[in-house]
Image (cartoon, grey):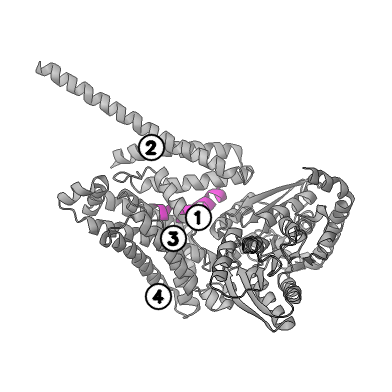
Amino acid sequence: MDEKVKRESAGFNRREFLKISALGVGAAALAACAPATPADVAPAEGGAQSSKQAKDSYKMTFVQVQPHTVSVAWGQGIEEVSNVQTNIEYKQVDGQGDPATQINLMDTAISEGVDIIFCQPADSVALGPSIKKARAAGIPVITLNIDAPEAHAAHVEMNHYFGAIDIAKAMGELMGGKGNVVILNAPPGIIIRDMRTNGFVDGMKKHHPDIKIIADQSAEWDRKKAQDVLSTILASGKEVNGVYGVNDSMALGAVDVAKTKDLIGKMVIFGNDGEKAALESIEADELSGTQYTDVWQQGRLAAALAIGLATGGISATSFTNQGHILMPYVIATKDNVGSIQAFQRW
Amino acid sequence: MLKKINYQSFGLVGFYLVIVIIFSALSPVFRTAGNFSNLLIGFSHIGILAVGQTFPILLGGIDLSVGAILGLVGMTTFDLMLIFGLPGYIAIPIGLVVGLLAGLINGLLIVRLKLNPFIVSLATMASFRGLVYAISGRQLFPGLTVMAIKDPTYLAIDGSLGHVPYALIYLIIIALITYFILHNTKLGMDLYAVGGNENAARLAGVNVNRVKIAAYLISGLCSAIAALILTSRMTTSPEGLGIGFELSAIAAAVIGGVNMQGGSGSTLGPVLGAFLIGTIYTGMNLLGVTQYAQPVVAGIILIGAVGYDQFMKERRRKELQAQLLLQSLRMKGQGG
């Protein structure tokens, strides 16, 4: 409670600044995404108008995969910006981790006539037909973190691939350029899993070719499952010098195992995302590092972009190219984690 | 037949209508044709799974593997079309056969090894899901993760006839056929007999093993049909497709009046049960009920639905008891 108050009071000016900068960046991104002459572009199938009339109020819906730390923080970032507009009605709905449920929610949002849909697809291809349907209805879709091959208004993502390269670089340095690494991975079928894995593998090849990746197993994004997977690998007698959790929850699961087996300080453990618990673990000398992204800011950027599109009357059928925004990040380690302020910790 | 429909489903129909009226009154979007069309499209596959699930439950069993069978059939057809380049009209029947085979494995394990259906289907749920990951073309050929099914025959599965989605037409046909099987064939009579009292049915000459295998075959086939609909809609088959669907199917069947102890229930109630679940979630989304409160509210409403149905059945049972008592007293009076 105290921390929240402290965050809100001490960080107020900074946060306001971030909000304003988010709006600025959003506006710039909007300029990049939106066509110069919307009227010149022929409407896509469905015949929706390429520009819309001004309205008294606007509706935005976020179809998330399921409630989790990251999407909750995105939602808070979106709400921070949308709440001050007074004419924006924002809603966040639960896809229950199931693409079929997400499709139903997308269909409902289209029937509702919302002005913007934010979507984190549970599967990149599966949501394609729904995105196409939204586009035909003139509703711009903004994807968060997980892109979809079906063209839509814009994609705002953490820097998965390049961030993972930097994780590999930093991790290899702490390992002295040699040893064995285990990857605790997400289940297959999600693009960011591949980007975060490929970036890490490529980074190791480039910066630390003597480090071997001896296992790459799914722990289903989950801390408890990560504990079980790593314990089994260690029980097989393999020497493990480093663990890369594709998200922070799995990396913290590895930290739990390292604590019980007295391996803290002997095993380098990195996560990805940069959630508050991971940063605190770094400060406690347990987790070695993580890729930190300000997810609140990511939500604010997406909101700024969305509000610009909605109030600007820009229809989804106007776009000639899909916009793409990569979030800035830092590789947080013990050396620099203190520079991430309390109000930036989600 | 009409008497049976009224007895089993009237309470639920009334409850469903009340829910629809409430949501329609509160949300202008809810009462639009577009929203009802979405509901019919979005929950028909759950209805089909619930109809399939009805058969094992009628026997006092359960099929927890329906979601995994759905995933397996979806991945099989995906692989056949995108890895092996087979046309949709060949992939579709093979998919249906895979669903039947999965149901056959469940049935054989239950009758041959005399294992509990809960344990068997729990085990096959894990095995079939593991198989989905093992044969996933999206993993074997990573480029396929972002490649969509384009076969026109396959994509036509999830089309529509004017404003009526094919998925609803399949559901209606399946519900009517299975209703006919249950109430007008020997297999149907045997299913109720085995579900009511397995030993008595066996003594009466019913081939219990064959009936059990048939129930799981029907469940597997329904899962396969649901898989074809969903993968046609999504134009892909995610590895996790169908996870958790077994719970929705079981819930829809039970809400629809199928007795978990076996022996009573039919296939029209579960269809309504599936749409009741869909209506509640869609209505709450449109009303802006917070996502954390939705499962709680849905749970309360569903308990209300089952409770009301149970209350009506109990009242009817007591009325029948009272009538029988009255009749026997009259007969005694006449005899005296």
**Mark 4: secondary structure:** helix
Range drawn in magenta: B30-50
Residue that label 2 marks: B10
Front label number (2 vs 3):
3
Residues at marks 1 and 3 touching, judged by CB atoms closer than 8 Å? no
Q: Residue furthest left?
A: B335
x and y, in percent, of residue B278 in the image: 51, 48
Q: Which of marks 2 and 3 is nearer the N terminus?
A: 2
Decide if residue A47 is in sight here: no
Q: Earlier in the sequence, mark 1 or mark 2?
A: 2
- Return the chain for callout 1: B
Q: Is residue A245 above or below residue A198?
A: above
Does A310 sit above or below residue B326?
below
Q: How crowded is mark 3: few (under 14 residues within 10 Å), some or many (20 or more)?
A: many
Residue A28 spot, x, y in % from top left = 84, 64
Dot 4: few (<14), some (14–19), or many (≥20) neighbours within 10 Å?
Answer: some
Number of on-image labels: 4
| Residue A89 visible here | yes
- Same-chain check, marks 1 and 4: yes
The residue to which callout 4 is attached is: B90
Marks 2/3: CA–CA distance? 27 Å
Relative image position of residue A153 (x, y in whole percent): 72, 64
- Quadrant holding the C terminus of chain B: top left
Q: Which of marks 2 and 4 is nearer the N terminus?
A: 2
The residue under label 1 is which amino acid type? Answer: Ile
Q: Name the residue under label 3.
A: B226
Q: What residue is disc 1 on? A: B41
Would you say the residues marked 2 and 4 are in contact, meaning their CB atoms lie under 8 Å apart? no
Relative to A277, B245 lies left or right: left
Amino acid at the residue labelled 2: Phe
